[in-house]
Amino acid sequence: MAKTIGTAVETTISEGLHIVVVGASGGIGQALIDQLLRDVGVTKVYGLSRKNYQPKSLTSSGSPSPTYQHLVVDYEDESTIENAAGQLTQPIDRVIVATGFLHNESIRPEKTFKQVTSDKLLHNMLVNVVGPSLIAKHFLPALRSDRKTVFAALSARVGSISDNQLGGWYSYRASKSALNMMIKTFSVELKRIQPQTVIVGLHPGTVDTGLSKPFQRNVAPNKLFAREHSADCLLSVIENITLDDSGYCFAWDGQRIAE
């Protein structure tokens, strides 16, 4: 259970939620959607990803679900993000950005500054900063204004500047630090124009997905989370954060991460 941090009073609800999950086809995104669709308090879930994704719990029925709608987006094409936001049919209560990049076949986290390249830096920034920032640009206005709403994006503990004791992973660290700064800057403006909206970064821990697969060898078994467990923790943090928490990054257990 996440710990509540902050003292501001806000209006919240426990039913009738309309939620957007960005990165629907990813490991954490899938787990979030599956859990939300089982929640009786959730009325509608929009899943966004490059590839069409239908939750396993719905595919057996063979007919469209009134609870779930998939929207195809290309995070490198802002027009597709704008188009997706335009397809929402009612105000939104939660936006959860579950996208992220750490490695692919040609890019690996740097062990030394000698491995830093423009390609690594630019690709990390494109996926981990530009994508979530454009999602925020077009989806923050879709959040309802009469009660507490949340915009949350997956960040990482390694994005903390003051907590960096190990070095390495230059491009990934820098991109997550930049994402945290974008979240902080959004929060400053939102306090003026959307005071009921909380925007935060979320550190999911080390989750058993393709993103962490090459780096799991040195992770203690009790620190490697199943994606379902991570989704449960993240949703708990989202429901427990307050208006005072806007602009900060929180770990899966609800603890605020040092900036």
Image (cartoon, rainbow, N blue to C red):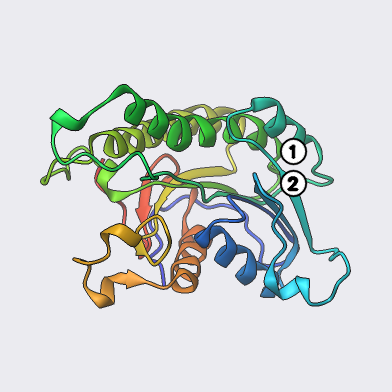
199 lies left or right of 184:
right
Q: Position of residue 139 (x, y in %)?
A: 66, 37
Q: Residue at x 27, y 38 (%)?
A: 173
Residue at the spot of label 2: 71
Between the C-alphas of marks 2 and 1, the distance is 6 Å
Q: Amino acid at mark 1?
A: Ala
- Considering every residue shown, the one lying at the far right of the view is 63
Q: Position of residue 172 (x, y in %)?
A: 31, 39
Q: Quadrant of residue 84?
A: top right
In which quadrant will I find the N terminus?
Answer: bottom left
Q: Amino acid at mark 2?
A: Leu
How many numbered marks are there?
2
Residue at the spot of label 1: 84
- Considering every residue shown, the one lying at the far top of the view is 118
Secondary structure beneath dot 2 equals strand
252 lies left or right of 38:
left
Tell me, for residue 258, which label it has, or none: none
Q: Position of residue 184 (x, y in %)?
A: 41, 33
Mark 1 or mark 2, which is nearer the start of the sequence? 2
Secondary structure beneath dot 1 equals helix
Q: Residue at x 52, y 51 (%)?
A: 98
Q: Vertically, is 115 above or below 63?
A: above
- Considering every residue shown, the one lying at the far left of the view is 165
Number of residues whose C-alpha sits closer than 10 Å to that of mark 1, classed few (under 14), some (14–19) or many (20 or more) = some
Q: Vertically, is 142 above or below 215?
A: above
Q: Quadrant of residue 251?
A: bottom left
* Disc 2 and disc 1 in contact, CB within 8 angstroms: yes
134 lies left or right of 145:
left
Number of residues whose C-alpha sits closer than 10 Å to that of mark 2, classed few (under 14), some (14–19) or many (20 or more) = many
Q: Vertically, is 64 above or below 158?
A: below
Q: Vertically, is 253 above or below 95?
A: below
